[in-house]
Amino acid sequence: MKEDLCKILVVDDMEANVRTMQMIFSDLPVTVVCALSGNEALSIILKESDFACILMDVQMPEMDGFETASIIHKNPSTVGIPIIFITAFSHHEVDVLRGYASGAVDYMLKPLNHRITISKVQIFCELHRQKRRLLQFRSIVDQTLDAIFVIDLATWAISDVNQHVCECLGYSPIEMQQMSITDIESMSEKEGGWQSTLVKIQQVAEASFCTIHRCSNGDCFPVEVNVKRVSCFGQDKVVAVARDITEQRRNEEQLKSKNRDLEDFNRLAVNRERRMIELKLEVNELSEALGRPQPYDLEGLLNPSPLDDVY
């Protein structure tokens, strides 16, 4: 797939070596970008830094591989790019420690073993794809309107949160990672909230509950929480999605209030109907006592016409 295509940067002052690299990787789903000097490599990386790895010759004129790698390693946007040094000298003749200090992750000796070279580059490309997917997933998670927590099941410590958590609670990501999940809960909800659920989740895979979260400024708001137990690198974690239900609670209270009003209205209507029946019976009884041929109409009595005979 096009979005999974990785780029690798080959840095060597010898064009023949560059062409050899292009030939080695010709069957791989990678784009090979070439630089014939350290300065050219830095110029390329300033424009685009999304490289799975860099294969760099150590011995180059003007700016050698050590100096080039050191500059790349000091740049925050490129510090994480793996650098493989390629050299014609043995490891005993090269300042290996200097190479690793400048940002290299591996050394390869010339002439290159094609199969080993391909295998190493494939590993770095797969790691790069996974990193890219994680960044995409993180971007989606940070844009969601729900608060997402990753919690250590053994200690209840917060391992990670999305951006919405920080915006809602008023803490920074670093502050959140120094807290227990129960630290953000209102005291009134301690017994039936996070504490009991984290105990319960050790026996079941999923659970849900409602509680009250407390912000850094002391404000509180109700949330509905869905939790799921997962295993991450051999550790039991809990992934929790918390949704602010303030508006839902407000609507529920308004619905209850409207229902009470409706019940009161219905009660008044029933009482009015009952009273109308009682009044009609009383009017009929009085009409008979007065010898009137027809009983008074109740609606006419309640709303008499000025021409009605009141005698």
Image (cartoon, rainbow, N blue to C red):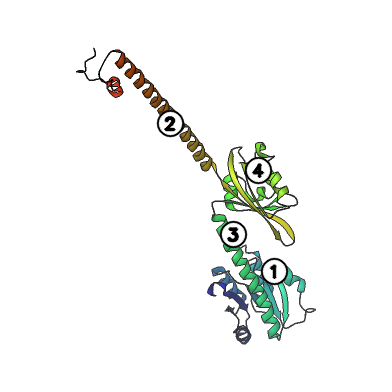
Q: Residue furthest right?
A: 92
State which tag comes first along the sequence, 2 or 3: 3
Q: Identify the residue at image location x=71%, y=81%.
A: 87
The residues bearing labels 2 and 1 have C-alpha atoms spaced at a distance of: 80 Å
Q: Identify the residue at image location x=71%, y=49%.
A: 200
The residues bearing labels 2 and 3 have C-alpha atoms spaced at a distance of: 54 Å
Give the amino acid at mark 3: Arg
State which tag comes first along the sequence, 4 or 3: 3
Q: Mark 4 — residue?
A: 184
Image quadrant where one finds the N terminus: bottom right
Give the amino acid at mark 4: Ile
Q: Nearer the viewer, mark 4 or mark 2?
A: 2
Q: Mark 1 — residue?
A: 103
Q: Are marks 4 and 2 in contact (CB under 8 Å)?
A: no
Mark 1 residue crowding within 10 angstroms, few (<14) / some (14–19) / many (20+): many
Mark 4 residue crowding within 10 angstroms, few (<14) / some (14–19) / many (20+): some
State which tag comes first along the sequence, 2 or 1: 1
User: Eyeballing the image, is 72 above or below 165?
Assistant: below
Q: Are marks 2 and 3 in contact (CB under 8 Å)?
A: no
Q: Quadrant of residue 220?
A: top right
The residues bearing labels 4 and 3 have C-alpha atoms spaced at a distance of: 23 Å
Q: Identify the residue at image location x=57%, y=45%.
A: 168
Q: Secondary structure at mark 1?
A: loop
- Circle number at residue 138: 3
State which tag comes first along the sequence, 4 or 2: 4
Q: Nearer the viewer, residue 92 or 174?
A: 174
Q: Nearer the viewer, residue 208 or 60?
A: 208
Q: Is residue 278 visible?
A: yes
Q: Nearer the viewer, residue 143 or 225?
A: 225
